[in-house]
Image (cartoon, coloured by chain):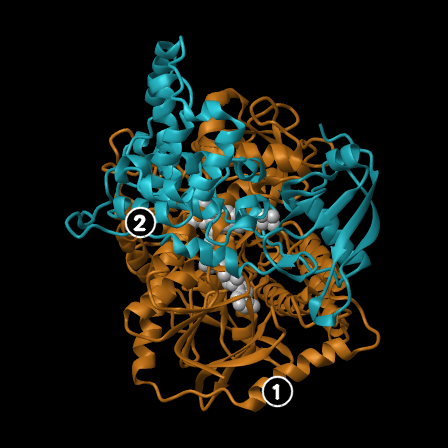
Amino acid sequence: MFAEEKLIPVPFDVYRFDPAQGGEPRYQHYELKLAPHTPVLSGLLKIRDEVDPTLALRYSCRSAICGSCAMLVNSKSRLACRTPVGPEVAKHGRVVIDPMRNQPVLRDLVVDQRGFWSNYRRIEPRLLLDPSRPMPEGRPTQMTPAQVDRFRETPRCIACASCYSACPAVEADPEFPGPMALAKLYRFVVDPRDGAHDERLRKVQLSGLWLCLRCHLCTEACPKDVRPSERIRDLKELAVRSQGATERGSRHAVGFLENIAEAGQLNEMKLVRQTDGLVGTVGQLGQGLRLARKKPELLKKPRTIDGVEEVRKLYEALQKDEEVPL
Amino acid sequence: MQRHDVVVVGAGLAGQRAALAAAQAGADVALVSKLHPLRSHSGAAQGGINAAVGAEDSVETHIYDTVKGSDYLGDQDAIEFFCQSAGPTVVEMEHFGTIFSRGEDGSLARRAFGGAGFPRTIYAADRTGLALLQAIYEHLGGVPVTTYEEWFLLSIVVRDGRVQGIVALDRRTGAVEGIAAKAVVIATGPAGRVYGRTTNAHSCTGDGIAAAYRAGAYLKDMEFVQFHPTALLESGILITEGARGEGGYLKNRLGERFMSKYAPHVLELASRDVVSRAIVTEVNAGNGFPGGYVTLELMHLGREKVESRLQEICDFSRSFAGIDPVTQPIPVMPAQHYMMGGVGTNIRGETNLRGLYAAGEAACVSIHGANRLGGNSLLETLVFGKQAGTAAAAYAKDAPDAAVTPADVDRETAALHALEDRKDGESPQRIRADLQQTMDSRVGIYRNPDDLHRALVEVRALQARWRAVRVEDRSSTYNIDLTDALEVGHLLDLAEVIAVGAIARTESRGAHTRVDFPKRDDQNWMRHTMARRTPEGPELSYAPVAYTRWEPKERVY
Ligand SMILES: Cc1cc2nc3c(=O)[nH]c(=O)nc-3n(C[C@H](O)[C@H](O)[C@H](O)COP(=O)(O)OP(=O)(O)OC[C@H]3O[C@@H](n4cnc5c(N)ncnc54)[C@H](O)[C@@H]3O)c2cc1C
Ligand code: FES
């Protein structure tokens, strides 16, 4: 079990850049010999302690709980302290270290997280009480284990920003608060103590919820298995249920669903109308006509497919299954 | 220059609770932290927080267990107040939004922890610290407090017999700035990195304790260092006591549950010092596994229980040691875990300096005396964080205006430049490694006078080397080489106080075990060690222990 692990050569290529000193970003090469299970962070600290004390990075707990050491390891958002070097070397031949994405570099691997935190603050991350439902005097609120389960894995979030770094919607649109903020919002929306569920859902519909591209890269990047993309999906469902489809993204999703349930396939004309409303649809008329010239079948009402009953049953079953209890 | 009524240094549980209390009392509050608040080491606490809320439990037994656990060095008036505050504190944190684990009936779930008479430890899976830290951070987000994120405390300014504020380094820009404040609360947390084998984070370097000491505050009971019995062999990462609370076994190479020899009644649930000593005794007697360790077994609990109740432990063992606790024993050894000592305070968090307060692991009230019970320190951060914040705000209300002068700031700037301008000299990392080696090997669980004296000589030699330390990094942005150097300077001050206190205390009590004085000596040593800084090193004096109702008894489990 603790048989001496053989040391392997580990070539590191580490991103270096100090904007204050000017110059261009570059990769600096370091050669270490490490046991394969050694975390990347231990390698970087060995570089700092023994080779080059000028390397800048954030770290503290070295046990995947403080969220300081997120960075790109061979292009993937990872916590350096819980990513062993062995598999990286086996797969890529070396360990290439870059700072996280979607946050400006302050120096080397240290990024400016002010944007990340202000996006998090946008969702009002604290219990907002309903004055008509105050906390019980002098004793804790009752909460069953089943109610605790509704938080799913969101209490495990360590705010490391790996998801934020991996998210293409964050990169594309400053309106999008990012996966971590939305997972946090979900945490408050399912909290039986919180008194602002509807208000939260109303606001988030209008401030970026539907910008999520459902690529699941956040869930892939999360070192704590918080699964932000799944919670964003839940939020969308909760938002529509609580508020109706009040916004383009949600109207599109709901229209899509209704189309399929009705006919088993999409009615593109109807979907545009459902998403953008009558006025909005007029705005898209030009594009619609161009499309229709190429594909005239789009103008016809699609026929109901044969197995539509099956499709409807499937929907019903799925809906029951995925019900997010409030 | 910035100006506030109260500056709280440190944004872990103690600091944030202090800031909240001071703000609620109407003070203009600044919260200064070298890490983002959510990255504080409080987040690493796994096991839980104590409060005697069960029907079969009582505040009275919590008090008794804490007094006994402290080996009668805890101040009983403070312990009474502390235990009485436990229930309301936990309820308050629940109301702030903490997501605790629950029993079937919807009440707060509890587990048994070492040294407690009943299941008294309230928890949130095995990430209680994170759950509390998130909740207080979220709650504080709704309160007006100015936060200085990633600002590093350099010194506490004292003039005219009272505190005037602090000087700090903005790590992002490299700027050295003064923050004037009538009251300063030190809540900078642990100093575990005095040791190499420690469960503490890299950031736990006792900065605030050292700054208070340099400013003239008394450090109390610093020789009492708790070692956690079960840390992962290589990295020192903690395997929580919860693992034993849930029914884990400790075994030696012979397959024996050896705790039956040392604590026949409570076995693995004996208090930490007892278990740590037992492990070292076993390994020294040749009963350890090759390489010198014992194992913690969870296999008999079954996959379901291990994976649901002890999630993080599973994760830790798998990620950091390549061990699957569902099917394999976990190799463990004791590691430094907690400093019972710290900046000496009374029950209101006041120190001997006017306007200086302290709370949390950086402080010593003393609740824990010679040995802390698991689950009591999270509670301490919140109970005494609130006390210190409240007292600091009350004091600031009537105190005269405070000022940090340009000369105060220039002095610190010059000191930093001196480190960076040296052409040659040793690296701080080198000095740190040697210090940790000294403390690990000579000031550990079993202490003998020879090693202690040698440790002191070595620490003083290291202090001399530190005066010629050289910082190679010249950047103004996020210069860790520079903060490393400062932190090592702090660790050296504290190591010296620990060694001096341990040499002087010729008895064994709680976590302090002298092989040449194996018995507790109430006649001579039922008193707190107080260390004050002088140019010649720490000067010791002693203060009485406060008694109320509990007569010292021998501690057996
Ligand atoms: C692994 C582990 C598990 C534990 N488990 C438990 C448990 O289950 N139950 C329990 O009761 N206790 C437990 N403890 C102990 C408990 O967690 C700590 O005693 C407690 O959290 C300390 O809190 P604090 O607020 O005093 O310090 P910390 O949370 O460490 O906060 C210190 C703060 O000070 C700041 N700081 C430090 N230096 C400077 C500086 N120079 N300038 C500016 N800011 C600075 C830091 O940024 C940080 O914000 C555990 C400890 C460890 C190490
Ligand atoms: S160092 Fe704390 S998460 Fe990696």
Q: Colour of chain B?
A: orange
- Camera-nearest residue between A98 and B65: A98
Pointer 2 residue: B90
Residue at mark 1: C-beta within 8 A of ligand 1: no
Quarter of the figure with residue B73: bottom left
Q: Quadrant of the N terminus of chain A?
A: top right
Between marks 2 and 1, how big is the CA–CA gap? Answer: 44 Å
Residue B410 — which label? 1
Q: Nearer the viewer, residue B251 or B129?
A: B129
- Of helix, strand and loop, which one carries label 2? helix
Q: Amino acid at mark 2?
A: Val
Q: Local crowd at mark 2 within 10 Å, few (<14), some, or many (≥20)? A: many
Query: The disc numbered 1 marks a residue on which chain?
Result: B
Query: Looking at this view, is B269 or B362 the one in front?
Result: B362
Q: Return the mark for residue B285.
A: none
Q: Colour of chain A?
A: cyan
Residue at the image point whose x is 44% and y is 80% from the top: B353
- As helix, strand or loop, the secondary structure at mark 1 comes to helix
